[in-house]
C-alpha cells in the first residue's frame, strides 16, 4: 500500500511538471528565471556488482564535470554539485552506493538540466548531462532499483 501511495505521488509530481510544460511551452519551462529559488536535485546510484573502483571514480569525475557545463549563452547554470559514497551506519541506505546533490538557482535551470524524457527538444536541455545518463546507465542495477532521483525547493 505504501509503495502504491508513493508511486501515485511520483506520478502526480511528474504529471504536474508535464502539465506546466504543456501550458507555458519549453522555452519558458527551461528559462533561467522560471520559478526562481534554490532547487536541490538528489541522485543516488546503485552500481552493479562488477563495477570497479576505477569505474566508480570515472563516473564521479564525469558527474562532477557537469558543473562546468553552460547554457547556449555560455553562462554556467549549475550552482554546485556535491558527491560522496554511502557512509551511514543506520542501515537505511537501501543498497545505494553513491550520492550527488546538484543545486540550481531556479526550477528552469533544473528543467534544462534534466531534459529527457520531459524536454525532448535538444535546444532546451543539456547535451552533456544527456550523454552522461547514457554513459552511466550500463553501470547501474537495471530499472528503478539502480537510480533514485529526488528534487525539492529549498
Image: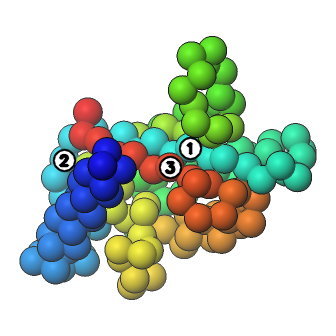
**N-terminal of the two: label 3 or label 1?**
1
- Decide if residue 60 is in sight here: yes
Residue ID for mark 1: 44
Q: Residue at x 42, y 70 (%)?
A: 115
Quadrant location of the C terminus?
top left
Residue 12 x, y percent position in the rendering: 20, 61
Going by the picture, which residue comes out furthest to the bottom? 121
For residue 1, above or below residue 17: above
Specify whether 9 is left or right of 136: left
Q: Which of 74 and 83 is in front in this view?
A: 83
Residue 148 x, y percent position in the rendering: 50, 49
Q: Which mark is residue 148?
A: 3
**N-terminal of the two: label 2 or label 3?**
2
Q: Which mark is residue 36?
A: 2
For residue 66, above or below residue 26: above
Residue neighbourhood size for the residue with mark 2, other residues' Cα within 10 Å, grouped as few (<14), some (14–19), many (≥20): some
Check if mark 3's residue and mark 1's residue have beta carbons within 8 Å: yes
Instruction: Give the Cα separation between the discs numbered 3 and 1.
Output: 5 Å
Going by the picture, which residue comes out furthest to the left? 23
**N-terminal of the two: label 1 or label 2?**
2
Q: Residue at x 33, y 62 (%)?
A: 111
Residue neighbourhood size for the residue with mark 3, other residues' Cα within 10 Å, grouped as few (<14), some (14–19), many (≥20): few
Amino acid at each position: 500500500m505504501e509503495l502504491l501511495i508513493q508511486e501515485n505521488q511520483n506520478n502526480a509530481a511528474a504529471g504536474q511538471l508535464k502539465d506546466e510544460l504543456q501550458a507555458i511551452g519549453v522555452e519558458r519551462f527551461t528559462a533561467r528565471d522560471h520559478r526562481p529559488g534554490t532547487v536541490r536535485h538528489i541522485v543516488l546510484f546503485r552500481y552493479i556488482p562488477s563495477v570497479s573502483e576505477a569505474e566508480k571514480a570515472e563516473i564521479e569525475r564525469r558527474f562532477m564535470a557537469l558543473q562546468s557545463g553552460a547554457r547556449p549563452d555560455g553562462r554556467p547554470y549549475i550552482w554546485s554539485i556535491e558527491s560522496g559514497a554511502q557512509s551511514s551506519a543506520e542501515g537505511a541506505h537501501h543498497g545505494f552506493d553513491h550520492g550527488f546533490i546538484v543545486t540550481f538557482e531556479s526550477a528552469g535551470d533544473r528543467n534544462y538540466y534534466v531534459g529527457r524524457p520531459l524536454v525532448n527538444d535538444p535546444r532546451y536541455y543539456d547535451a552533456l548531462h544527456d550523454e552522461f545518463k547514457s554513459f552511466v546507465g550500463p553501470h547501474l542495477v537495471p530499472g528503478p532499483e539502480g537510480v533514485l532521483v529526488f528534487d525539492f525547493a529549498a
